[in-house]
Structures are given as structure tokens and as C-alpha cells.
Image: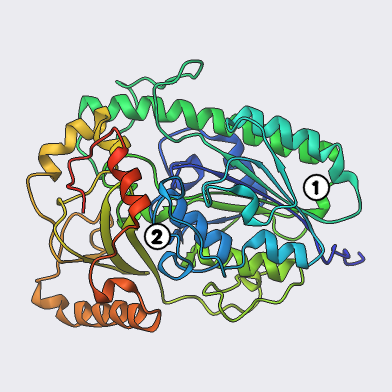
Amino acid sequence: MPTRSYNTRPNIIEVICHDLGQHVGCLGAPIETPNIDALAGDGVLFGNYCCTAAQCSPSRGSIMTGRYPHNNGLVGLAHIGWQIGANEVTLPMYLNRAGYHTRLIGHQHEHAEAPRLGYQTIEQVPYDARSVAAALDAFLHGDAQDSQPFFASCGITEPHRPYEREGYDRDDADALEVLPYLPDRPGIREDLAGLHGLIWRLDEALGTMLEALDDSGLADDTVFIFTTDHGIAMPRAKGTCYDPGIMTVLALRWPGRFDGGRVQDELLTNCDLLPTLLDLAGAEVPPQVEGRSFLELLDEEDYEPRDDVFAEMTWHDQYNPMRAIRTNRYKYIRNFGWRPLVYMPADIYVAPAGEEMKEDFYNEVRPAEELYDLRADPLEQNNIIDDPAYEDVAWQLRTRVYNWMDETNDPLLYGDYPPTKEQRERIEERPMDNGVPHV
């Protein structure tokens, strides 16, 4: 049988949703997501894919630049005033240079002014899943039929809060399976019931997109990517460096090349996606990119796995500075300044699940350091930072985090990371309070 000749510059469709984490059926979550599962079953699914920050803009900024938030400048939410640095080069800019047509369909949360991200075309469509899916369908049967390779980023707001939305189904709060890292309480069940309805709508839209791609005749020459920015908007997930916050879904399909339903467990960071896509596009990966291409892993060739990935938070709706390292076995978190035991972003704090957890999380100050043995304690419930048996591990990981901060000139090494006057005004104008003092 002759070897297939691949398009050396495939089309690329990236579907990115909000606040999903790994809450999908194919990664073991107690929810039915048949279309996401089918994509994983046809392509390659990554089981240890981490974001750089468990919050929207900074994580997406790392996908956009291949760099960690404190290096690319996007250390807080774009709508509050944080921005990718003026000298940073984004994924659309790189692909423009490589001869791609770049298009944004729907939502982005990396810049207050979307045109500054470098897309050649921006489709102003509603950000809900069905509208974005319909717009992608129209594009695939229209302009995408030109011979020029394209990159289309499809941004979907679901399943971002609020979880109570008209026109969406809800799960049965009494029958669903609760999260293993949280107690079984009515408010948590109530929020999960709404979350599941939004995920079902997202899954439906993904099925529409995949069907449109297949019907367009472009599937064989297109890499289809599905991912999210960070973990679900529940306590001890979004806004933290625990695994439910930083572990995210990533599934890719390219028929005949990235297929077969493989599951890869190598440790990756979402900084790695940009250099991988540049490799696929035949574009040079510049030295300032901090991610590492995993194209060899996709192609089942020799690949040197990562020993670790880093995660961070600086600003969200409040100041929440922390830095972390995750290896295959351990998680080390360095917390800076006074914060509650577990920080909850405002949209979680005021929700039923947040109400259930306030007394658990906001009557105690978090420790300066946290260490978890993920093999013995995968839910990260037992902080072993003071356990003599782990003294050497703590020292090694503490040193690796400090060295990383030092090598990248992290501003947290020099004290607090203050907002600009404009950012402070926007923070203080926000109507919701999450119980954390302004800094």
C-alpha cells in the first residue's frame, strides 16, 4: 500500500472553551460527553496536559505566546486591564508569516482589543456554542475552500458560569456523582447540575463542528484540536494550583496521522501547543518560546518527556500570588502573602458551591508552602511539607521553583505585584466580593 502524502501545511481548527478542565467522560469524569469522547476515540487524547494558570486570560495568553504569564505580561484578566506585552508575538502572527489565513470565530479573552492579537479575519458572532458551531460550518463550506491553509480559533463561552441559564438542560442534582475532592453538600450538587447542562450543550456543538468538517471535504487535510483554558469553576479547582484547576483536556485529530484513539500520559503544559503548531506549519520556533513541541510524541517518534511543568497565579479578581511545580509524582506550591486557605474567584464565592465552602476555606490562612505526593494522595488533601520523610523532595522542588523564578526574572521575587491605577479602579468597581481584601 502506498504511503499517504500529507499536506505539509495542514489546516488547523482550534476549539477552545471556558472552564472545563478534565470534566469530560473520556478522562473519567462522571458525565456523558459522547462527541468529545468520539473525538478522543478517533484521535489522540492527553491525560496529563496542564495549563500555566487556572484562570482565563493568563492561561490563554500562554497558548497564544508559548510563554508563561509573568513573562508575556498577561498576569491577570484582560477585561480588567492586563495585556500581553507589546513586544510579544502571538500564534496568529506566527502563522500569518507562515502563509496561513488566520481567523477568530467567536470568543477570545487574551486582549481587550481582539484585532491586536493578529487575526486577519474576526467574525463577530455570539459566543455561545451553537452560534460558534454554525459560523464554523459556514466558513468550512465557504472561504475555507480556497487553497490557502487556514488557522481558525473557535472560542466558546460554555461552560463558564452562571450555571443557571434559560434554555439549557440540567442534570439531576440528587442522582449525579459529586466531586471526590469536595464534600457532598446540596449547594455543590446544585452547581454541578447546571454545569453538566452547559457541558452537554458544548458537546453537542463539538459534534456539529466535526460533522461540518467531514462534510466539507477538508477533514483529511485538517488538524482538529479541542481544549480548554483551565479547570471547572468550582471550589478547589479554578483559581488554584491543585490538579482540578490546572489539568485540562486536549484532544487532537488528523485522519491518517493523529488518530487511532491513543491516550498519552506524558506531562505537558499548554505553552507546548504553540511550538507544536508551528512545527506542523513548517514555521521556525523562536528561542523566546518557553514551550516544547510535542510533534514527535504525536507522530509516535522518539520524544524526551518533560520532568516537570510550572503553574502560577498573580492577579484574578483579587491578588492571589502563588507559584507551583508539578512532576509526575509531586506537587509543590509556594504561596505569597496572606490569603485564605483556598481562594475562590468571585463567581464561585457567591454561587451555591461557594456558599457551602466559605467556612471551610475562609477561616484559616493558607500555609507558605504546600507539598503533595500525588501517588499516595492524588486528591491533594494531605500537605506533607513538614513531614521529615519528604524533606529532600521539598528542598529540591522549592529550589526548582526559585531557580525558575530567578531565571525568568519573576517580579514576585522583588515583592508584591501591584496593579496600575486603571487596573485598580476596575478591580474596585467590580460588584462581586469574594471575601479577599483588595491589595
Instruction: Report crowding for label 1: few under 14, some 14 to 19, many 20 or more residues within 10 A (C-alpha).
Output: some
Residue 28 location (% of width, % of height): 43, 44
Given the image, on which type of amino acid does mark 1 rest? Answer: Ala
Residue 399 location (% of width, % of height): 26, 82
Tell me if 302 is positioned left or right of 229 in this view.
right
* Residue reaching furthest to the front: 421
Disc 1, SS: helix
At 60% from the left and 70% from the top, the residue drawn is 294
At 27% from the left and 77% from the top, the residue drawn is 397
Closer to us: mark 2 or mark 1?
2
Give the residue at mark 2: 75
* Residue 145 visible (yes or no): yes
Tell me if 298 is positioned left or right of 189 in this view.
right
Give the residue at mark 1: 219
Residue 353 location (% of width, % of height): 25, 32
Q: CA distance from mark 2 to mark 1?
A: 36 Å
